[in-house]
Amino acid sequence: MTGLPGATAASRATGEGQCLVTGASGFIGAHVAERLLAAGRGVRCLVRPSSDTARLRELGAELAVGDLAGARSPRPAVRGCTDVVHCAALVSDWATVAEMRAVNVHGTRRLLEAAASEGVRRVVHLSTTDVYGHPGTPNVGEACVPSRFGSWYAQTKREAEEEVRRVSRERGLAVAIVRPATVYGPGSREVVGEIARALTRGQMLLVDAGRCDAGLSYVENVVDLVLLALTHTAAPGGAFNASDGLGVTWRRFTDDLAAGLGCEPARFSLPYGVARGIGYGLEHAYRAVRKASGATIPPLLSRQAVDVLGRPQSFDTTAARTQLGWKPGVNYGAGLAATVRWLEGEGLSRRE
């Protein structure tokens, strides 16, 4: 899972008691679980029955099978844990708002209520910079209030944060929120893996020629911030952006990936407005087809994807740096190299 060892003191964070990690079979959650285990923490992972748990079992994590959107309470999974890192979410460009709200909002509320009832010491809630609504302005800070939402995913993640704050306020639960931007690195199948597949097939589509800041955050740097939020005395009650502040555009990132994989760079681009209109149409057409036939292949383009590729992903990380002492420990060159090695291991390289 990890392409590089943790690069900062946060990677050596230790603490007493067991930590529950939700979403541990996913990209960021898997890295969090592995780093906690490497630091000597006991780790329990809340996983769905369908999750691939082979790596978690190999690492020695305890598994608790459940579903935050299901009928059963998550309290048995929380019981006995001193801390919770909540990474689970339904990240989708095309699911219905009801489906996303069931996991992202109601599931988060049920988990936080269970944590409060079980006397958990601290919860770190993994959110996203999508909650700002892609305002298109540079250096977006944590106090930014969105005027609109471009996707139901972003809206439900903002609603989830409101539930986090409500439970924290009403139940006295110590909670910190981490908002990563575009997280890349080994294991990123839904973002980097999809980009790599599109590049190797000659089908990668950029928006506005890839001129926008991609907001890249190497996954181990994000985990460093999560671990600081789990242990630092200044973290409870705060929200913290996570971005490496590289200023790397989508054009540069996709060109660098293409070079690393030995394939041609992206050749196609659409203006933002055109791409977003197409994405809107494809989303609604897909939902109709899905309802009629049960198809599970996602649409080729969505408003969420267009906003990520076509709006500046520039975020202010002053709060994380000054309040928690965080700084990205893995630089772009090292992070890119680790990512390419992982992609090669996945069979996505064109090099002989």
Image: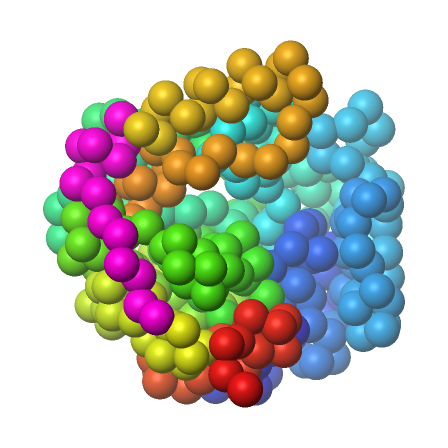
Relative depth, front residue between 217 and 186: 186
Relative depth, front residue between 84 and 287: 287
Residue 339, position as x, y percentages in the image = 49, 76
Relative placement, left or right, of 115 versus 322 is: right
- Identified at 44% across, 84% down, the residue is 337
Q: Is residue 221 magenta?
A: no
Q: Is residue 269 magenta?
A: yes
From this view, report whether residue 330 is shown above or below residue 239.
below
Whether residue 320 appears in this view of the structure is no
Quarter occupied by the N terminus: bottom right
From this view, report whether residue 173 is shown above or below residue 325.
above
Relative placement, left or right, of 53 versus 11 is: right
Residue 351, position as x, y percentages in the image = 50, 83
**Segment tinted magenta in the rendering:** 264-277
- Identified at 65% across, 32% down, the residue is 296
Relative depth, front residue between 158 and 169: 158
